[in-house]
Amino acid sequence: MFTILVLAPGDADLAALGSRHPSVEILGAHDVEDALEKLARNRRIDAVLLLNADAGAAAEILEEDPGAPPLFAPGISAAIPGLRSLGPGRPAELVERLVGVLAAES
């Protein structure tokens, strides 16, 4: 079972993202403060997916929680430290790729 925290704009439909994988739990956060709160309360989170690829959000998460799980984002520059790229794609595709990465690394 993988637990993925998805940081996405308020209008994103996060409920459907984990529907393809019965062994994936998706937790949603609409801003950095919400994400940090969920990270503090849930140590079972395996990865954080930043759908808006915000370098500022990644930096804030890593600063506030140095032990945070790995951070991923779509189509980003490798110049953002601590943030791994999943390449471009729709949210469901990104979750698919992320599950593949987590499975390969576990």
Image (cartoon, helix red, strand yellow):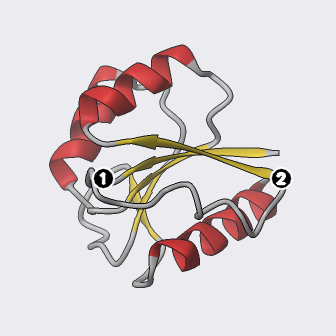
Residue furthest to the left in view is 56
Q: Secondary structure at mark 1?
A: loop
In the rendered view, tell whether residue 56 sits above or below residue 36.
below
Instruction: Please tell me how crowded label 1 is: few (under 14), some (14-19), or many (20+) other residues with Cα within 10 Å.
Output: few
For the residue pair 71 and 29, the one nearer the viewer reads as 29
Where residue 56 sits: x, y (%)?
A: 16, 46
For the residue pair 89 and 69, the one nearer the viewer reads as 89
Q: Residue at x 49, y 56 (%)?
A: 14
In the rendered view, tell whether residue 61 sits above or below residue 50.
above
Residue under numbered circle 2: 23
Label at residue 81? 1
Q: Give the residue type at disc 2.
A: Ser
Q: Residue at x 61, y 65 (%)?
A: 98
In the rendered view, tell whether residue 9 sits above or below residue 17.
above
Q: Residue at x 45, y 81 (%)?
A: 90
**Side of 95 where 58 appears, left or right:** left
Where residue 25 sits: x, y (%)?
A: 69, 46
